[in-house]
Amino acid sequence: MERQLHIISTGKQPLDQFVAICARVHPYVDAIHVREKMKTAREISEFLTALIKQGVPPRKIIVNDRIDVAVVFGVKGVQLAHHSLSVRKVKHHFPSLSIGCSVHSIAEAMEAEESGADYCIYGHVFATGSKVGVPPRGIESLRSVVNHVNIPVIAIGGIHSNNAEQVLKAGAQGIAVMSAVFFADDPVSEAKKLAKIVKKMV
Amino acid sequence: MERQLHIISTGKQPLDQFVAICARVHPYVDAIHVREKMKTAREISEFLTALIKQGVPPRKIIVNDRIDVAVVFGVKGVQLAHHSLSVRKVKHHFPSLSIGCSVHSIAEAMEAEESGADYCIYGHVFATGSKVGVPPRGIESLRSVVNHVNIPVIAIGGIHSNNAEQVLKAGAQGIAVMSAVFFADDPVSEAKKLAKIVKKMV
């Protein structure tokens, strides 16, 4: 897998704002995660309908937790967490979906790999506004996780254009950002900057 | 379709209590709905695993809203509401599932039928503790709904053994209860009583 740039919805932006940003930045990113944990299936569907209508390719869209919504919209895959259906069951029943698994330790990353996850997202690496009060896991722990699994590890948590390079140097196969792009003054410029960092690391 | 007795989880009972009741009453009911709206996919999975382990036949189990969880556990079907994925999309992508649709008016019932729902649940017919402050829709409105659609209409809301018969006489193809069974002093006796009323109406 080529190194990747994932962007993840914040759960805090209204549909119009989120979709408008995605419509402009999707050429520079590999995956857009719709992670709207407080929203109903119908509301998530409205996000997906709008994204696709605005030209975001379904093969770049990943739905958090709701496998059924991902299937119905024919998008690339799902991102599963501890509170989701198990990776093994999802892999068995929905083999055509790409399955990402959110992990927070070496043990969880190894379990994700063994269960059939296609990649994992590990974090949070740096301090981040979305995990206030939980100490960041740091670059060295990221390196350990990368060394213990063969599936790609995408790093998440407080990553932006000033620290993305050290994350990739630690072995991450990519980075996932939320606020760095969605709350940027200029989301397109930030996405381009991040994509450039990710792609030049070969 | 034969007349049916559905029982629906209250969202207020712990797993052990809910499953223990289901293990004893399932022979008398046609469908058990796992409707735990505040729970994660993983938690709902735990409910299903326990139900099946305790001998409840998967063909009697219906999962509220989460089509993915229903598919993974191979249960009978799903119950969809306004906030769920659309009946049409679910029918198209998961044709083997039985699809119930919760409706609150003639128009919604007609739309459910047209979209491919296998049955609808209409209510609430009588006043109920789970819809405090919302006036009940009454027997006459149930009769109107029944007269406007060809799919089976299951009545819900404040139904127990003392008023079930008038609901069935109004044309409902069955009844759905929550507290009448799950909060009964003797759930088995209540389920038997309700089943007898439902089955004698031919």
Image (cartoon, coloured by chain):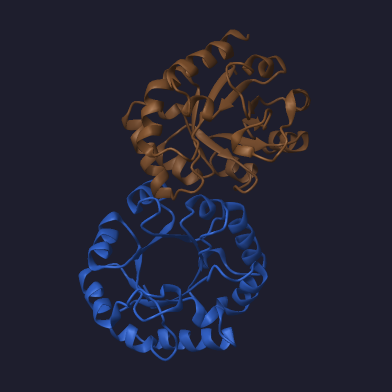
Chain colours: A blue, B brown
Picture quadrant of residue A73: bottom right
Residue A95 image position (x, y, % from top left) = 40, 51
Q: Is B95 placed above or below B177 here?
A: below
Residue at 66% across / 17% down in the picture? B168
Residue A141 image position (x, y, % from top left) = 25, 77
Image check: B179 left or right of B121? left
Depth check: A155 or B165 in front?
B165
Residue at 53% across / 63% down in the picture? A36
Depth check: B71 or A200 in front?
B71
Instruction: Report the label total.
Output: 0
Image check: A20 left or right of B196? right
Residue B84 image position (x, y, % from top left) = 60, 47
Q: Which corner quadrant holds the N terminus of chain B?
A: top right
Q: Which corner quadrant holds the C terminus of chain B?
A: top right
Residue at 62% across / 79% down in the picture? A24
Q: Is residue A75 visible?
A: yes
Q: Is A82 placed above or below B147 here?
A: below
Q: Is A165 placed above or below B70 here?
A: below
